[in-house]
Image (tube, rainbow, N blue to C red):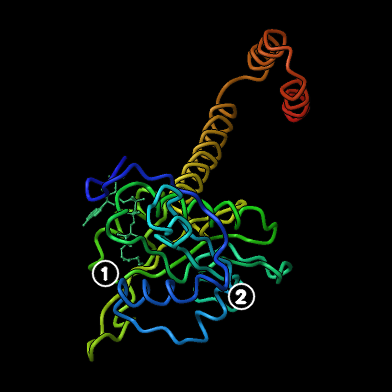
Amino acid sequence: MVNPKLSHHPTICYRPIQPSDLEVLERIHGDLFPIRYESEFFQNVVNGREIVSWAAVDRSRPDGQSDELIGFITARIVLAKESEITDLLRYDSSKSDQTLVYILTVGVVEAYRNCGIASALIRKVIKYASSIPTCRAVYLHVIFYNNAAIHLYKKMSFKCVRRLQGFYFINGQHCDSYLFVYYVNGGCSPCSPLELVTVMVSYMRSLLKTVTTKLIKNEDRKVPKWPKRTETNSLILATQNRRISTAECSVYECV
Ligand SMILES: CC(C)(COP(=O)(O)OP(=O)(O)OC[C@H]1O[C@@H](n2cnc3c(N)ncnc32)[C@H](O)[C@@H]1OP(=O)(O)O)[C@@H](O)C(=O)NCCC(=O)NCCS
């Protein structure tokens, strides 16, 4: 999709953020976010110090701007046991090296929005996280009123798992944030609704089985021995099932 605000057809490419991006990166962060980031953060991004990042550039952009950032994403690896979402993972204490990827910032300049650029940048992070065998999830915070970003994360199948009261402090005001998680490499919440249903169904089935067995035993006690034996034998012949056959033996012996 092409944004009508653009006077040309863009050719979007993605590449790592590099030291020459420093000035534009700082400027765009200043334009897009209500939070001020320290210069150390930008230095770490452009030099790849403990932060991974991707830039989006428009190769068709005129006036020598074909390598200038029009979008970016920054993220870092954190240890799962030291993160705030340890309780949202099925944490295996024997695997203390489990990691997560935390998205720090993502943004696209206004003229290039709604072209799928942020989606593509997030997919890069998901692919990167999936390539790390110890990584179990990608997660991030978003301010509660940022509808465009919330729509984007939901569209990308992130799960909104928590609302954090007063997480951000902006212009002297506390604002809530949502916590979104995208599980990778088989990482999942300790008890997802699906798991809960599965556990309940298997519990109900075993309960039903126990009750049925008890009822059958009670019935058996009421009827004479020989007819029952004949019935059981015909069942065995009909099914040719070894497990039933074994069961039949024990029943036969017990009777
Ligand atoms: C959020 C942001 C990164 C999205 O970038 P983008 O390149 O436009 O994202 P995409 O094109 O991949 O997807 C945008 C989706 O959001 C939808 N959207 C845009 N504005 C919206 C709004 N106000 N409310 C709801 N949905 C909105 C679009 O329709 C599109 O969804 P669709 O594909 O289902 O139609 C961009 O708006 C931005 O940079 N905002 C300022 C910085 C920011 O808020 N960053 C996130 C901080 S957590």
In this view, the residue in front, 234 or 96, is: 96
Badge number at residue 144? 1
Which residue appears at 30% of the width and 71% of the height?
143
Residue at the far bottom: name it.
172
Q: Label 2, secondary structure: give it.
A: loop
Q: Residue 95: give x, y in percent of width and height.
A: 72, 67
Q: Residue 252: give x, y in percent of width and height.
A: 75, 23
Q: Which quadrant of the frame does ligand 1 lie within? A: bottom left
- Residue at which label 2 appears: 47
Please state if 9 lies on the left or on the right of 11 as rendered: left
Gap in angstroms between the C-alphas marked 1 and 2: 31 Å
Q: Label 1, secondary structure: give it.
A: loop
Amino acid found under the numbered disc labelled 1: Phe
Q: Residue 213: give x, y in percent of width and height.
A: 57, 34
Please state if 161 lies on the left or on the right of 17 as rendered: left
Q: Is residue 234 above or below residue 133?
A: above
Q: Is mark 1 within 8 Å of ligand 1?
A: no
In this view, the residue in front, 123 or 71, is: 71
Which residue appears at 37% of the width and 64% of the height?
107
In this view, the residue in front, 205 or 49, is: 49
Which residue appears at 30% of the width and 42% of the height?
2
Amino acid found under the numbered disc labelled 2: Asn
- Residue density around tag 2, few if under 14, some if 14–19, many if 20 or more, within 10 Å: some
Contact check, label 1 and label 2, Cβ < 8 Å: no
